């Protein structure tokens, strides 16, 4: 992988936004907070509540959620409104995840280790990680990617590889991860620090005991990173 500067979000630089169930912002070299969750981490009744809240948020900014083109309408709004919508949806999403619902298979150390090894495998080649935590039913991480499009591609690669190996360990087949991931471009050093603390504190908030999660945090100042500030 070619060297690239690791930075915080630059509103004036080129970026891309892809809309699925959630908006996905990408910018070359920008640190991104990413959440991936297992398929059963948010049961249907809880997910229905999230959709209701999301639709209420859309109505509050003048968009009819029943309109099949609501993603395009959202793109036409000022960036501040788009960002506020994404942050609010994210807070609701993470609040549901922190309840540790579902089978919570990643509570098993052997399965969590599969995910951790996958996250670290191409660190420094395809991407640069600063932090991650493998929770019983989801993963949070902060990383930077070489170009636009690489973030979602890498998330899909992580999910395919780990799902194959976790299912093999369990003697199962089928989808393990939810298709959509939540992501948020890190906008400042202070936000970066807050997100690192959020990742580190997530197991405590969920009431997990040692051995029920895996946490990693790179020491800042490491030559592998060239952060601004």
Image (cartoon, rainbow, N blue to C red):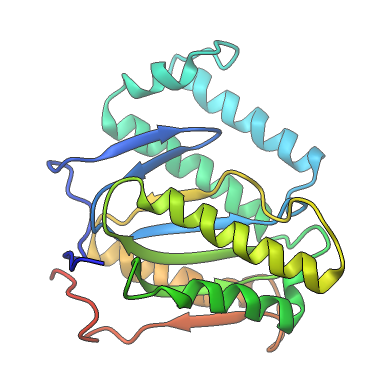
**Quadrant position of the N terminus in the picture:** bottom left
Residue 137 is at least partly visible in this image: no
Q: Quadrant of residue 78?
A: top left
For the point 71% across and 79% down, the residue is 208
Residue 73 is at least partly visible in this image: yes
* Residue 64 appears left or right of 10: right
Q: Quadrant of residue 3?
A: bottom left
**Residue 153: x percent and y percent?**
45, 50
Q: Nearer the viewer, residue 42 or 225?
A: 225
For the point 64% across and 76% down, the residue is 114
Residue 55, compared with residue 227, is above or below; it is: above
**Quadrant position of the C terminus in the picture:** bottom left
Residue 198, compared with residue 181, is above or below; it is: below
**Residue 127: x percent and y percent?**
34, 66
Q: Nearer the viewer, residue 122 or 196?
A: 122
For the point 52% across and 65% down, the residue is 140
**Residue 109: x percent and y percent?**
72, 83
* Residue 68 appears left or right of 103: left
For the point 80% across and 39% down, the residue is 44
**Residue 122: x percent and y percent?**
41, 73
């Amino acid at each position: 992988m070619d060297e690239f500067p690791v930075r915080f979000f630059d509103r004036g630089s080129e970026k891309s936004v892809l809309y699925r169930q959630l908006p996905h912002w990408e910018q070359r070299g920008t640190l991104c907070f990413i959440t991936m969750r297992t398929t059963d981490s948010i049961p249907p009744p809880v997910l229905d509540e999230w959709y209701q809240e999301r639709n209420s948020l859309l109505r509050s900014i003048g968009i009819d959620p029943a309109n099949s083109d609501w993603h395009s309408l959202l793109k036409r709004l000022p960036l501040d409104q788009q960002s506020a919508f994404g942050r609010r949806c994210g807070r609701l999403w993470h609040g549901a995840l922190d309840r540790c619902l579902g089978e919570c298979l990643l509570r098993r150390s052997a399965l969590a280790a599969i995910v951790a090894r996958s996250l670290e495998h191409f660190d420094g080649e395809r991407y640069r990680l600063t932090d991650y935590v493998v929770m019983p039913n989801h993963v949070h991480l902060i990383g930077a990617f070489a170009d636009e499009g690489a973030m979602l591609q890498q998330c899909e690669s992580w999910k395919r590889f780990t799902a194959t190996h976790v299912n093999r360990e369990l003697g199962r087949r089928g989808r393990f991860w939810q298709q959509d991931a939540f992501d948020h471009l890190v906008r400042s050093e202070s936000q970066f620090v807050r997100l690192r603390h959020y990742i580190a504190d997530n197991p405590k908030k969920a009431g997990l005991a040692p051995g029920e999660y895996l946490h990693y945090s790179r020491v800042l100042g490491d030559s592998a990173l060239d952060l601004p500030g």
